[in-house]
Amino acid sequence: MDAAPPSPTPQVYLGEQYVNSSTLSDVTFLVEGKRFYAHRIALLASSDAFRAMFDGGYREKDARDIEIPNIRWDVFELMMRFIYTGSVEVTNELAQDLLRAADQYLLEGLKRLCEYTIAQDVNLDNVSDMYDLSEAFHAMSLRHTCVLFILEQFDKICTRPGFSQLIQRVIPELRNFFAKALRPSHRSAQP
């Protein structure tokens, strides 16, 4: 008899009222020249990337102001809102940039939200780019969606430019998919 897996540690959120609030703020991010007030405890609880930033040997450990040069304000604000509340509405316009930020800061829950939003928009014109995106940011759910889309729309995709390059990139994923699907399960081996 298998034991149930241990319950994950529940995440505690500071709440909406502390998003970009100077109340009890102990760190400030500088994004596109604007200040974003934050709380180390919320960041430490959110991801290993922030734990490394504040507990590791990085220069940010004792810094009061931390410059964020590679993320736009609207994307950073949405990422922080997720850290403080545990949920955000991810729009198509911001989903790819937010996925990039979520991957950079190891925010798996936010990554899943972004992948879901992006997956809703996969089509014949962008499936190759979306597959590339999934590979670049280790977005497994999005990659799976792209592979299924390619299989379902194979007759239409095979007539498009760049088809053979796309298939060459997807073949290892298909091989893994079929290997898992065709592997005999442990239950069928038992009487």
Image (cartoon, grey):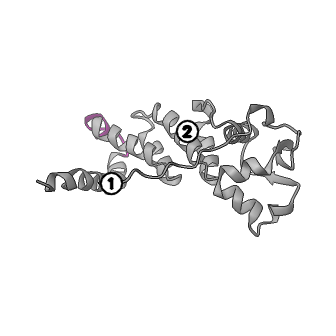
Q: Which residue is mark 1?
A: 2
Query: In the drawing, does residue 118 fall left or right of residue 35?
Result: left
Q: Which mark is residue 96?
A: none
What is the CA distance from the residue labelled 2 to the residue labelled 1?
Answer: 34 Å
Residue ID at (40%, 50%):
4
Residue 155 visible in the snapshot:
yes
Q: Residues within 10 Å of mark 2 (few under 14, many from 20)?
A: many
Quarter of the rendering containing residue 122? top left
| SS category of the residue bearing label 2 | helix
The residue at 80%/36% (across/down) is 18
Please state if 80 lies on the left or on the right of 120 as rendered.
right
Check disc 1: other Cα within 10 Å, few if <14, some if 14-19, many if 20+: few
Instruction: Specify the amino acid type for callout 2.
Output: Cys
Q: Which sits in the foreground, 102 or 158?
A: 102
Q: Is residue 185 visible?
A: no
What is the x, y in percent for residue 20?
Answer: 81, 38
Residue 159 is one of the magenta-drawn residues: yes
Q: Main secondary structure of the magenta part?
A: loop
Tag 1, which secondary structure?
loop
Q: Three-letter amino acid code at disc 1?
A: Asp
Query: In x, y percent, where is residue 74?
Result: 73, 36
Residue 6 on the magenta segment = no
Q: Which residue is mark 2?
A: 114
Given the current orientation, which residue lies at the most extreme left position?
191
Residue 115 rendering spot, x and y as whole percentages: 51, 40
Q: Position of residue 181 (x, y in %)?
A: 24, 50
Q: Earlier in the sequence, mark 2 or mark 1?
A: 1
- The label nearer to you, 2 versus 1, is 1
The magenta-colored residue range is: 153-162
